[in-house]
Image (spheres, rainbow, N blue to C red):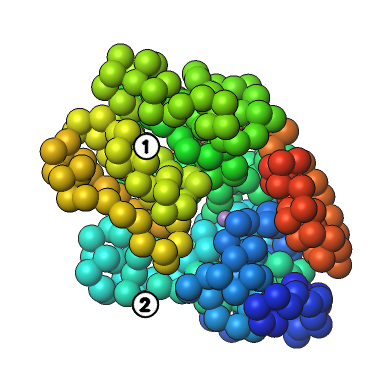
Amino acid sequence: MKAVQVTGPGRIDIVEKEMPRITREDEVLVKVRLAGICGSDMHIYHGTSPVATYPRVIGHEMVGEVAETGPAVKRVKAGDRVVMEPIEWCGECYACRSGRRNVCARLEVYGVSRDGAFSEYIVLPERIVHKVDDRLDWHEAVLIEPFTIGAQANWRGGVAAGDTVFIMGAGTIGLCSLQVAKIKGATCIVSDLSDDKLAYAKSLGADYTLNPLKCDIPEELARITGGLGPNVTIDAVCTPKTFEQAVEITSIAGRVVCLGFDVTPSSIAQYSITKKELTIAGSRLQTDKFPEVIGWFQSGKIKADNFVTHRFALTEVGRAVELIETRPDKVRKVVLEIG
Ligand code: MN
């Protein structure tokens, strides 16, 4: 079968792999239909992921169809439409025992530290396979995983009804975080350098949109919030500067959520955090968010119909990557149509 492998930094290849087989009772063989290209896939390709190992079959945003099940599998059967929760955890370490298996001491991530979903078939343990309704469009279901990242960011930020949430960046994770925050009953402000992306954020429910090229962000935030600042800032731009700004502009008793893997330090004085008693929360992957997010998709609470902007065959992955790099303003989510 065919798969997309990042052989080393800067090298992406279509490779021929042996068809995977079920070897344990609790495993599921999935025929991959669609897989989304994530920012983290691009980092692995560029060699800027501090967690990836090579060579690696990338991809973790997957929807497919169950082809075969091991004898102990109970929740899914052949023909079911499924998405994958792309993590493996030990169940024993401090994080796992605290209900935070997404940061397990022995965490493995599909498409990052073990082979992922840009392949025609994949074998997965039943515990990370989640069934979705047949009526859900494939091109919507493929977005479930990125929305779990948005759900996690909201959970880590303690977003509640009545909060004002400032989302930096209207890329995939920013837009997913926005929709989850709206479901939670928050007022949402979104910033981005692209007016097109801001217009789309508005169509998804953003209450205010701000372009830092055209306005002074701290001033605008103060105006909108009556001088208080947003209660929660979700930094989905993830540069050292945006993290610094997030700490500066977030309200008293507020929360700052960071999602980046940048290893460059930010310059933040303790006092900025202490005086407002800010909570700075990292948000990585997700824990237990799949059932809730799948429910939102199935009940139509999430608007995802125009989210996928470009589709390519698996063998066209080089063109897909080039498009993401050269036209970031035109791209929301690019998917590979694999099977
Ligand atoms: Mn992703």
Q: Residue at x 48, y 73 (%)?
A: 50
Label 1 CA crowd tier, 10 Å (few <14, some 14–19, many 20+): many
Q: Amino acid at mark 2?
A: Arg
Question: From what the image shows, is residue 23 above or below residue 39?
Answer: below
Residue at 53%, 45% (x, y): give it: 173
Q: Position of residue 88 (x, y in %)?
A: 45, 71
Q: Quadrant of residue 12?
A: bottom right
Q: Is residue 80 above or below residue 193?
A: below
Residue topped by disc 2: 106
The foreground one among 80 and 318 is 318
The correct choice, above or below, for 106 with respect to 210 in the image is below
Give the residue type at disc 1: Thr
> Quick check: 274 above or below 38?
above
Lower sequence index among marks 2 and 1: 2
Q: Which mark is residue 233?
A: 1
Q: How many marks?
A: 2
Dot 2, how many residues are within 10 Å of its Cα: few (below 14), some (14-19), or many (20+)?
Answer: some
Q: In this orientation, does residue 259 appear? A: no
